[in-house]
Amino acid sequence: MTAGGYAADLIKASCQIPQMYDKAGYHLWQDFAATNKNAATNRRSPMFRITTIALLLGITAAATAGLGAVSFAQVSADPNGAPNPYRLDADWLKIPDGRKFGQVTGVDIDPDGKSVWVFERCGARDCVNSTLNPIDKFDASGKLVASFGQGHFNHPHGFHVDRQGNVWATDNTAGNGKGHVVIKFSPEGKVSLTLGKPGVAGVGPDMFNAPTDVAVARNGDIIVSDGHGGNTNARIVKFTPDGKLLYVTNSAIRSVSAIDTKAMKVVANIPVGEVPKRINTLALR
């Protein structure tokens, strides 16, 4: 303990004398009783309490005075002083010659626990008219082992790899008959499911307006955050594993509309506390 910390503890103790009397004061009482046969009658007297308090304050004052010119200021701990078990491996990722990453919007770990998936904007700020693949998989050594997604996206945004290794990605911008969709790819890159109407924004039960993220729950249910500010949507949408709508929040996210998927109509309102306000992929794994 530093000198400043020791003095601070003494001062704190002196300020807590009324609460500490039965403990600290009792030891002083034992010494007093050994030399005063009438102490038993005096222990609870006001004078005894005052004497005890004065004695403790005297001890505190003497201890702090004895520290002389020692500084009581506590030295701030270095926020970067803790051990760091990690190191930068700047050369780990091995991107093919002539290829570069654009804006990276998503990174996820493969179910093998070693491989890394990357979702990026085709070497630029978007993938409009690009012939590059925005989805890449790298093994534990950083070697590129899979690449796909060319021609499916305008503006890559949300990204998720589920427990079965399927790759989910969102496009939140319309154009060229693409966008406003959530696409599911097999681990090999084959499209197995598309949610939303490509290139069409809307608020209908089968439409999105700027879907920003997607995640898959343990039971396979699909959860999409739909909206990116401005005049886009502002809701959470949940689907069954095969893409049937389960519920959708209203734009203010105050309640949830339970959907009759056959009649496509609202059948009940559910308190918003029963649905997620944002997608937490760690909680869903």
Image (cartoon, rainbow, N blue to C red):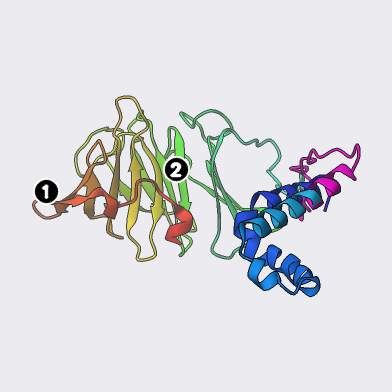
Can you tell which mark lies on residue 72?
A: none
Label 2: which residue?
158
Residue 63 magenta-drawn? Answer: yes
Task: Give the mark nearest the N terminus, 1 or 2.
Answer: 2
Which sits in the foreground, 142 or 202? 202
The boundaries of the magenta stretch are 59-87
In the rendered image, residue 4, in percent from the top left (x then y), is placed at: 81, 44
Residue 212 figure quarter: top left
- Is 55 located above or below residue 157 in the figure? below
Residue 176 figure quarter: top left
Measured in 3D between alpha carbons, the distance from the residue under mark 1 to the one under mark 2, in whole angstroms, is 28 Å
In this image, 31 relative to 214: left or right?
right
Kind of residue sitting beneath label 2: Gly
In the rendered image, residue 161, in percent from the top left (x then y), is placed at: 48, 55
Which sits in the foreground, 34 or 60? 34
Residue 135 magenta-drawn? Answer: no
Kind of residue sitting beneath label 1: Val
Kind of element beneath mark 2: strand
Question: Among all residues in the image, which is located at the extreme top?
Answer: 230
